[in-house]
Image (tube, rainbow, N blue to C red):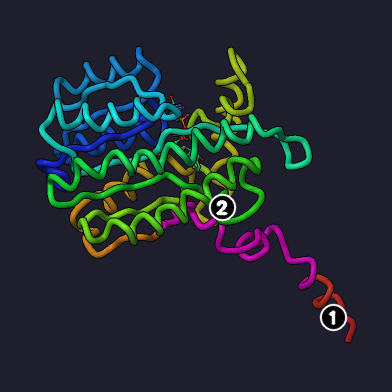
Amino acid sequence: MDRLKDKVAVVTGGCSGIGLATVELFAAEGARVVLADVQDDKGAEVERRFNGQVRYQHCDVTQESAIEAAMQAAADAYGGLDVVFNNAGAGGARERIDEIGGEAWDRTQALLLRSVALGIRYAVPHMQKRGGGAIVNTASIAGLQAGYGPIAYSVAKAGVIHLTTAAAAELARHRIRVNAICPGYILTGIFTASSGISGEAVEQVNAALGQMAPHAQPVAKAGSPRHIAEACLFLASDAAEFVTGTHMVVDGGITIGPRTAWDPNTPSPIRAVLERARNKT
Ligand SMILES: NC(=O)c1ccc[n+]([C@@H]2O[C@H](COP(=O)([O-])OP(=O)(O)OC[C@H]3O[C@@H](n4cnc5c(N)ncnc54)[C@H](O)[C@@H]3O)[C@@H](O)[C@H]2O)c1
């Protein structure tokens, strides 16, 4: 398949989960990809697997100079830059609003929001040279509603959604499209890592999460990194040439309404009261 033929892409956080699935799909669709991450061993392994079509670049996205260097690496290795997926992330600070300190707050915003702003910032000069480009940012349903992540994470992801809109407005004149994806519950290592679970417990917890996942939302299957990669491919490709400044929710329907709206085994308490009253009359 050739949906990204002749395109050069940078994918941050490409060593695992959503990022890795996207690197694999982009490469299968003909792109040449710079995978930017901090996991050097895994990055080297992916690079070997793709035999010249994927280059690994060590890049801590909390470091401005590292982001700039990752975009430059794409231009140096493959002659330009057409697509950026600002995706690297982790759960961030877990404290509640009445516990969190300023340092933990800043660290989370730097990882999840500032990194995306700078990813856009340093992609633009390269995309201008190509006459345009496509940027996709990983937000989250946690940026749309409360209850899907810790507060610092949720606010950062809400920021990514609005950053996407504001940047799309500024960059349209350069023919650069900017869109976001809001994944729902996707089975990756982010849950155990950000909960501080390690060692043998990781596999057990992941297996338990895997069993629970198909029942978490109206679409009765587990959300996989590939589901997000497919959405990213669409937004990155010329098929989305008329799409900018938006966020695509890819969540198996979890945000369409409360569980009572779609799960027959969870009846609405209000409806139950009304039905009892109706049965008496
Ligand atoms: N998994 C979900 O359910 C879910 C839901 C909504 C949003 N997301 C978002 O998706 C993105 C990818 O997460 P994932 O679920 O694939 O998790 P993951 O842990 O599998 O992958 C995250 C990747 O980001 C890299 N990374 C972390 N910190 C980095 C840094 N400072 N610099 C460079 N790379 C760094 C990690 O090494 C890893 O390869 C994140 O932004 C996350 O917030 C995930």
* Badge nearest the viewer, 2 or 1: 2
Please tell me which of labels 2 and 1 falls first in the chain. Answer: 2
Kind of residue indicated by mark 2: Gln
- The answer to whether residue 159 is magenta is no
Task: Mark 2 and mark 1 in contact? Answer it, CB < 8 Å.
Answer: no
Q: Residue tagged by mark 2?
A: 217
Q: Residue tagged by mark 1?
A: 279
How many other residues sit within 10 Å of disc 2, few (<14), some (14-19) or many (≥20)? many
Q: Secondary structure at mark 1?
A: helix
Q: Is 126 rendered above or below residue 68?
A: below
Please say whether residue 26 is visible from this viewpoint: yes
Image-based side of 59 in relation to 76, left or right? right
Q: Quadrant of the C terminus?
A: bottom right
Compute the Cα span from label 2 to label 1: 31 Å
- The answer to whether residue 270 is magenta is yes
Q: Is 165 rendered above or below residue 148?
A: below
Q: Position of residue 150 (x, y in %)?
A: 65, 40
Q: Which residue occupies 40% across, 20% down?
A: 38
Q: Which residue occupies 34% across, 61% down?
A: 169
Kind of residue indicated by mark 1: Asn
Q: Which residue occupies 65% across, 52% down?
A: 146
Q: Which residue occupies 65% across, 43% down?
A: 151
Please say whether residue 1 is visible from this viewpoint: no
Which of the pair 185/211 is nearer the observer?
185
Region of the chain picked out in magenta, as a range: 247-271
Most extreme residue toward the bottom is 281
- Tag count: 2
Q: Position of residue 250 (x, y in %)?
A: 44, 52
Q: Secondary structure at mark 2?
A: loop
